[in-house]
Structures are given as C-alpha cells and as structure tokens.
Image (spheres, helix red, strand yellow):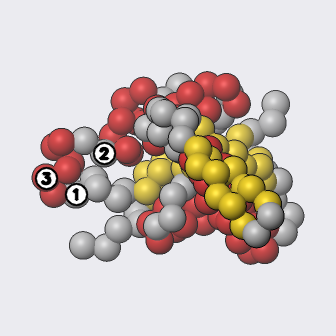
Amino acid sequence: MAKIVLTGVDNTAPAAAAARKAAELAAGLGARLHVLSAYGKNFEAERIEVGSEEILITNEQTAKDVAGDVFSQIRKDFPGLEVTYGAGEGKPADALVRAAEELDADVIVVGNKRVQGLTRVLGSIARDVAAHAPCDVYIAHTHQR
C-alpha cells in the first residue's frame, strides 16, 4: 500500500514551513506527498484582456498555482520525493479532510498558525482538521510566539 502525506498551503511562510515538514515526513516514510490549496466554496472567475488575447482567471486556478509554487520548491529541495498537487473546493479544513478521504491519506500535516491565543478558542484549521480527519494529523510548529 502506498503511503500518502497530505498538506495544505496558502501564500504564507507558516504554510510553506508546514509543507517542508510534510515533505520531510513523506521522505522518511517513503510516502508520496500531496500539496493542496483551498479556494473557497463559490467558484469565481474574471476575464482579463491582454492585448488581443483574453485570459480567464479563476479562484480554482489561483489555488492550484499556489500549490504548484510549493510543489516546485519541494521538488528542488527533495528531488527523490514523489509529489503531486492540486486545488480543493471549500474552507481549508474541509478541503483537506475531503482530500484525505479521496486520496486515502495516511497523515495530514498542518501548521500551528492560529492555534495560539483567542483563536485557539474560536477555531483554527488545525483544530478543525484534527476533529474531522479520517487519518492521523501532524501539527507542525510553524508559528513563533
């Protein structure tokens, strides 16, 4: 059975740090790493004219590009690691849990952003993932106090 490590990313340094920890974990387990970026519940698109061409930009494509940037960095830093990436619809925690179910992931790696202070009580992605995940959850230390 192939092992799968799943991590969620956005355009923040803590997410990149969690993705790096996920890559280290996947490499150590001999697992595949899947990098996911969430894009919200509502599909949004905008057409932009550039010269004589028209470009369609969607929030799904933007999320996929974010995941692709992290994918590229991980491929450079971990050349022997099998890495895939994609975009997931919904709030970050929901998208990660759904992807973990679809991929039959063994572990989800999330950062500890917003796990401190008042937001610890009000909610965080890590807490929501841990509450609903179909697999183990690894909370990487990515936020300095």
Q: Which residue is disc 1 drawn over? A: 116
User: Where is residue 141 drawn, in percent x and y?
Assistant: 41, 63
Residue ID at (71%, 40%)? 4
Q: Which residue is disc 2 drawn over? A: 124
The amino acid type found where label 2 is placed reads Ser
Disc 2 from disc 1: Cα separation: 9 Å
Which dot marks residue 93? none
Disc 3 from disc 1: Cα separation: 7 Å
Front residue of 18 and 31: 18
Residue ID at (64%, 58%)? 48
Front residue of 94 and 136: 94
Q: Label 3 crowding class (10 Å Cα cut-off): few <14, some 14-19, many 20+?
A: few
Q: What element carries label 2?
A: loop
> Looking at the image, is 103 positioned above or below residue 39?
above
Q: For residue 122, what is the image quadrant?
A: top left
Q: For residue 128, say whether it is visible.
A: yes
User: Where is residue 125 drawn, in percent x and y?
Assistant: 37, 44
Q: For residue 22, say whether it is visible.
A: no
| In this picture, residue 106 sits left or right of residue 94 | right
Q: Which residue is disc 3 drawn over? A: 118
